[in-house]
Amino acid sequence: MSSFVGVLVSDQWLQSQFTQVQLRTLKSKFVSVKTQTGRVTVGDLPPVFKKLNAFNELLNEDEIKRILGESYKNMEEEIDFESFLR
């Protein structure tokens, strides 16, 4: 008997925007960054986003940095998984 462990998000609207497969993939990418540094900052995100298909074909890493810089003044700001999803 196998047990399915899904990724739960406290924001139900945010949860509804992704399939469980997508959430598990995104959680894996988020955790891989956190494992390397012990935390995840906004500055860690551009290379992660660049690896995602949705961003890979549209934006380069510098464009992703610029967009994040418009939303976050401090690129060293730590973020949690739900902020990562937003």
Image (spheres, rainbow, N blue to C red):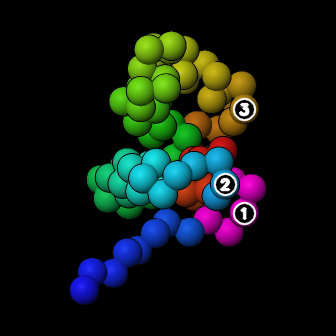
Q: Where's the N terminus, which quadrant?
A: bottom left
Disc 1 secondary structure class:
helix
Residue placed under numbered mark 1 in the picture: 12
Residue placed under numbered mark 2 in the picture: 16
> From where the camera sits, is residue 3 visible?
yes
- Pick the front one: 59 or 16: 16
Discs 3/2, front: 2
Q: Residues within 10 Å of mark 3 (few under 14, many from 20)?
A: few
Label 2 to label 1, Cα distance in Å?
Answer: 6 Å
Please provide the residue range marked out in magenta: 9-14
| Residue projecting furthest to the front | 1
Residue at the spot x=68%, y=69% of the render?
10
Q: Tell me if residue 73 comes above or below residue 25 in the rendering.
A: above
Q: Is residue 11 magenta?
A: yes
- Pick the front one: 75 or 20: 20
Which callout, 3 or 1, points at the residue further toward the start of the chain?
Answer: 1
Q: Is residue 84 magenta?
A: no
Label 3 to label 1, Cα distance in Å?
Answer: 23 Å
